Image (spheres, rainbow, N blue to C red):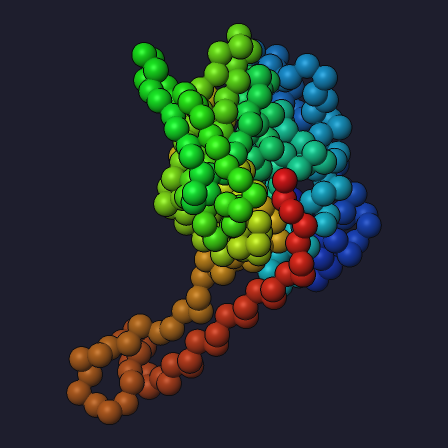
Amino acid sequence: MEQPINPQQQASQPSNVPTSQSATALKRFQEETADMVLTRVEAMTEAGELILPANYHAGNAVKLAWLYLQTVKDRNDRPAVDVCTRESICNCFLEMVIKGLSVAKKQCYFIVTGNQLSFWEDYRGKLMRAKRDTDIADVFPQVIYEGDKFAYSVDERGQYQLESHETSLNNIDIDKIVGAYAVVVKKDGSRHIEVMTMAQIRNSWQQGAARGQSGAHKNFTDQMCKKTVIARACKVELGAAEDDEEEVRPDEAAAQRDAAQQITEPLPTTPYIDVTAQTSEIVDAATGEVVQPEPIAPQPQASKPAGRKCPL
């Protein structure tokens, strides 16, 4: 595993001026961040630790990532460049380059969690990497509804094979989905299927911050099922190390960011209270002073996003 980038210097600027509001500071931040990432990439490449995909230009990818980063904000509408550490930004950019992904192609994106920038790979990124780095030629997903006639078998290698799937327009109802499968076509022409029941799919969604409750999950359930089974099929081919989470993000970055903020931001702290004190007053055990702890203010709820387009 690559060691994280640990920048030695921070851009010098007045502490009361956010980076995003100073053209000079923003440009310096961009240049220093890009230099750190590209220097690490160059060192890894020269050492034989990294081979970039053909036609992948790390410099262009970092430039596009920087442009995208300037649109990323936290739940309080603060720019990521103002609240996130440069170390976390550099590491997100580095992971993007190592995997040969692009934010411009929606293969990955960045999310603010506290003062850290987090990297998330979209299912499009997994599919692209599987087709590029494994023997997968393509993946074709399909949904199974109540009333469908779906049959599959297990071959001599222990892989599932599609025998038949008969459906009709009368069966199509997103509230009556019983499962999904993906036909995985290999480059040698062989194929198999990855099958998931609806219970497995929902368990997968529970691993994500939206818990399967985003607008896309509710309104485009069939498409989200297809996305999930594609991700599962690709992660199996990419290796066990990639199969640590079945569904780590909803299809909309904004929904993930809001949910992640609610989970990761710490609640206000309260004084340590000596509950054994023989008095009607509340005493701080550390100072011996009488305190009246303030109630914790409720966290603001993420606003419900406007109508979303189908994610696939």
Q: Quadrant of the C terminus?
A: top right
What residue is rendered at 67% in x and 58% in y? 307
- The answer to whether residue 264 shows anywhere in this view is no
Residue 134 spot, x, y in % from top left: 52, 16
67 and 161: which is toward the camera: 161
> What is the quadrant of residue 48 in the picture?
top right
Using the image as rendered, state which of residue 108 and residue 128 is in the foreground: 128
Pick the residue in front: 64 or 240: 240
Expressed as whole percent of the image width and height from the top left, the position of residue 61 reads 71, 30
**From the viewer's perspective, is residue 209 above or below residue 303?**
above
Kindly give the residue lying farthest to the top in the view shown.
188
Counting from the top left corner in percent of width and height, residue 152 is at: 38, 25
Looking at this view, name the residue that lies furthest to the right.
Answer: 23
Residue at 28% over, 83% down: 283
Q: Residue at x 78, y 56 (%)?
A: 21
Where the N terminus falls, by quadrant? top left
Count of marks placed on residues:
0
Residue 160 in view here: yes
What percent of the width, then of the height, locates residue 246? Answer: 43, 38
Q: Residue at 32% of width from left, 12% of height from top?
A: 156
Front residue of this view, candidates 312 and 298:
312
User: Is 89 displayed left or right of 164 in the figure?
Assistant: right
